[in-house]
Structures are given as structure tokens and as C-alpha cells.
Image (tube, rainbow, N blue to C red):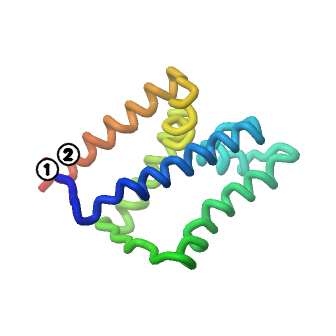
Amino acid sequence: MIDWINFTPWTALAGGLLIGLAAAVFVLFNGRIAGISGILGGLLRAHPGDVGWRMAFLAGLMAAPVLYGLVAALPEVTVNAGEGTLLVAGLLVGVGTRYGAGCTSGHGVCGISRMSPRSLIATATFMFAGFITVYIVRHALT
């Protein structure tokens, strides 16, 4: 069911366009895919000349909501999970990005736009796993 009162198609469209534009500019100027797990993972085994742009990219990810908060109200964040659940979920996401050779930003945004078969399969798998998880947590376990 759609929450029509809080439905924000124009801001969602603008956000999607900005993400797509940023990914395109990143690949044009840097020659690399804007996959967050790969950028962060690259800091753990950094090659000469790679640290600066990786740190700048990650700093921009952290600075963006702070800058946005200066001009508009940030949405309220509600997490309906305990620390243990969040820890296990984070570890599963980390393991999944290693086995899947990337994350949703690398495969879903950049890979699909390049029509990468591996990314199409990975993104379909992410989505299917998400659907199943939501169904189990919200319907089967309650």
C-alpha cells in the first residue's frame, strides 16, 4: 500500500538523476565504477595514487547529509532492530558484497547501465533476497 501523504516522486526522481549523473561523471573522469564496497575495500589494500580519491569519495558520502541538513530538515530515522540484528545484518551485507563481487551501487547503478550480465543477475538476486527477507520477517515470523 502506498503512503500517498508521504509519497515524494519528484524528490526521488531528482535523487535518482543525481546518483546517475554522479556515477557517469565518476566513470568519465576517473575511469572507475562508483561501487561503494569496492572504493572502501580498496583502502584496505591501497595502491599508490588510490588513497586520495577514495578518501575524497567517502568523505563526500559522509558530508552530503550534513550539507543537506544545513538547508533542509533531515528525515527522521527509525530503526526497528536491536544492536545484535544490525551487527549480523551488516556482516551478512559485507560477506555478500565480497561473494557478489560488488554491492548494490556498483551492480545496480553502474553495472545495469552498462548492460553487464553479471550485474543484471546480481541485482535481480539482491532484489529477490530482499523480497524474501521482508516477507519472512514481516509475515512468516509474526
Q: Is residue 26 left or right of residue 49?
A: left
In this view, the residue in front, 129 or 119, is 119
Residue 81 place in picture, x, y as percent: 31, 65
Residue at horizontal 38 percent and vertical 31 percent from the top: 124
Residue at horizontal 28 percent and vertical 64 percent from the top: 6
Residue 96 place in picture, x, y as percent: 47, 40
- In the current view of this chain or complex, which residue is farthest to the top? 117
Location of mark 1 (residue): 139
78 over 33 or under it: above or below: below
Q: Which mark is residue 135?
A: 2
Numbered circles on residues, count: 2
Image quadrant where residue 111 sits: top right
Which element is circle 1 on? helix
Residue 97 place in picture, x, y as percent: 52, 41
137 over 101 or under it: above or below: below
Which element is circle 2 on? helix
133 over 61 or under it: above or below: above
Q: Find out whether the residues at labels 1 and 2 contact each other: C-beta distance under 8 Å.
A: yes
Kind of residue indicated by mark 2: Tyr
Residue at horizontal 29 percent and vertical 67 percent from the top: 80
Q: Which mark is residue 32?
A: none
- In the current view of this chain or complex, which residue is farthest to the right? 48
Kind of residue indicated by mark 1: His
Residue at horizontal 43 percent and vertical 33 percent from the top: 123
- In the current view of this chain or complex, which residue is farthest to the front? 10
In this view, the residue in front, 11 or 129, is 11
